[in-house]
Image (tube, rainbow, N blue to C red):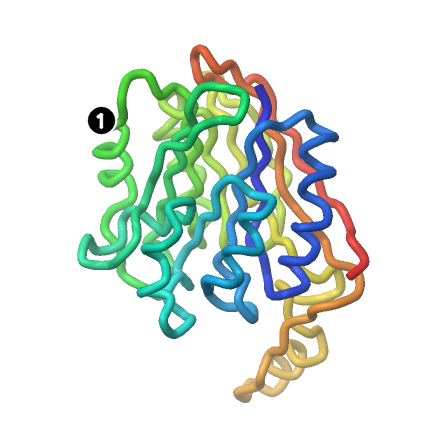
Amino acid sequence: MNMIFLGDVVGKGGRSAVKKLLPELKREFNAQFAVVNGENAAAGSGLSGSCLRELLEVADVVTSGDHTWDQKGFENEIAGFDRCIRPANFSIRQPGRGYGIFRNPLGGEVAVIVLQGKVFMRDSAYCPFETVEKILASLPKTVKTILVDFHAEATSEKLAMGYFLEGKVTAVLGTHTHVQTADARVLPGGTAYLTDAGMCGADRSVLGREVDAVLKKFHAGMPVRLPVVESGAIRVDGVAISYDQATGRAAGITPFSRIAEI
């Protein structure tokens, strides 16, 4: 079996590129299931109901991260989307859910878990390691395929989570930094790992934002509006994972990066 995971979607351009390329990617990799991190899908920061509906036209599950609540009113909208997952180690008082079990169109079930890191992250969250331990213990024994989106800043924290979950989940895939890393591998325990999947955003940009504006901010050190690049060459980064449905063990992980003209 095969599934696809896409890195952070940035703005309207990212959404449009995902809608255009994800069906093609599923055919290319013969993938039956697709998960997309959409936490920057609404104007480059957060999610909205309308953005989610767009992404869920082609994705099976949309995950999020530290920008989950950036868009006003989304805390009320999220309850209407059972295929949208926010970090599981947010406070239990926050709306939404941190994991879910979803039906694979070709049979079997896939558990998707989202965790937020603690190192260098702006918002407080419970320990992701303790949180995922509790979730795994609660999953039905029949669920063998488990994908973890670890939304974190520090590469050390991400790599530690990969080793922590080695042999316990199908894949640990990092998001948040928007730059695809070159360390994709299947750990000996049968867990596919990548420190960061990258982003679905403008190819000529700084993390999806206009280059000149970002340079001005770094050069002058003054507050500057950072517009999202919404058109032109939009890059779609992600990975394809092959796995054994009976055991949940990963057999391969293939990073990719494609360009869509929007």
When asked about the image quadrant of residue 32, the answer is: top right
Answer with left or right where residue 251 lies relative to residue 89: right
Q: Name the residue carrying label 1.
A: 137
Residue at the spot 42% in from the left edge and 71% down from the top edge: 71
Residue found at the very far top of the displayed protein: 246
Is 48 placed above or below 38 here?
A: below
Q: Position of residue 10 (x, y in %)?
A: 59, 62
Near mark 1 (Cα within 10 A), the count class, few <14, some 14-19 or many ≥20, is: few
Residue found at the far left of this picture? 93
Out of 128 and 79, give the one closest to the viewer.
79
Q: Residue at position x 50%, y 54% from top? A: 176
Q: Residue 245: x and y, percent? A: 48, 15
Query: Splitting the image into 4 quarters, where does residue 253 fall?
Result: top right
Kindly identify the residue that appears in the image at 54 percent across and 46 percent down: 36
Q: Secondary structure at mark 1?
A: helix
Which quarter of the rendering shows the C terminus? bottom right
Identify which amino acid the numbered label 1 is placed on.
Ala
Q: Quadrant of the N terminus?
A: top right
Q: Using the image, determine if residue 241 lies above or below residue 160.
A: above
Task: Give percent across and percent down for residue 2.
Answer: 59, 24
Tell me: 18 left or right of 224: right
